[in-house]
Image (tube, rainbow, N blue to C red):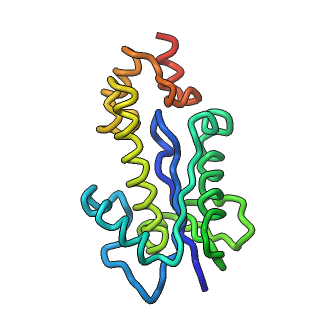
Amino acid sequence: MLIAGVDEVGRGPLAGPVVTAAVILDPNYPINGLADSKTLSEKRREALVPQIQQYALAWAMGRAEVHEIDQLNILQASLLAMRRAVMALMVTPDKVHVDGIHAPDLPYPVQTIIKGDQHDLAIAAASILAKVSRDQEMQRLDQQYPGYDLAKHKGYPTAAHREALKKLGPSAIHRRSFRPVQLSLLS
């Protein structure tokens, strides 16, 4: 049975897209060290990405942009990004395992798994691909939108990020539907 693991990164930040990945692992080529991306160092995550891309039966990325997040809400945008990742797979899964309690609308059987990135290796692999991809994008966006320190906090609502929002106002990549961004428009 081919099982696609799906995870997202970027629901909580005030800026940037939500990024998802879907991975179907090959049981004949196990990848050592797969774990929840949050428990791995940046260096370890980056080392695992080419292994996942090389040895998985299939992998694909999905995303929802800031305007979609603001239009749909973050949950629906995350589910849309997950659907995009699964539908982009070059191999059709028999079943999809999704981290969390919410499932995207898919033409395959779907099982949600609370803390799935800790219990399911395909979800862990997806969490690694999504995290590395989004982190690298936020580093690039830091060059494009200086002053917010996006490379450091990746868009999450740290005290420094909130202070930069008050000082500079929101950029084009800030989620205007999020309260701290809305409040920065008022100050």
The residue at 58%/77% (across/down) is 3
As rendered, which of 99 and 150 lies closer to the eye?
150
On screen, residue 173 versus residue 145, left or right, reads right
On screen, residue 120 versus residue 51, left or right, reads right
Q: Which residue lies furthest to the right in this view?
A: 107
Snapshot quadrant of residue 160: top left
Q: Residue furthest top?
A: 187
Q: Is residue 30 above or below residue 119?
A: below
Query: Residue 23: horizontal and vertical position, in percent?
Result: 51, 70
Q: How many labels, in total?
A: 0
Q: In this view, does 41 lie above or below 89?
A: above
The residue at 60%/38% (across/down) is 69
The residue at 39%/27% (across/down) is 145
Query: Residue 28: horizontal and vertical position, in percent?
Result: 44, 89
Q: Is residue 93 above or below residue 74?
A: below
As rendered, which of 7 and 55 lies closer to the eye?
55
Query: Residue 143: horizontal and vertical position, in percent?
Result: 34, 32
Dividing the image into 4 quarters, which one contains the N terminus? bottom right
Query: Residue 86: horizontal and vertical position, in percent?
Result: 62, 64
On screen, residue 42 versus residue 84, left or right, reads left
Q: In this view, does 125 lie above or below 72?
A: below
Snapshot quadrant of residue 142: top left
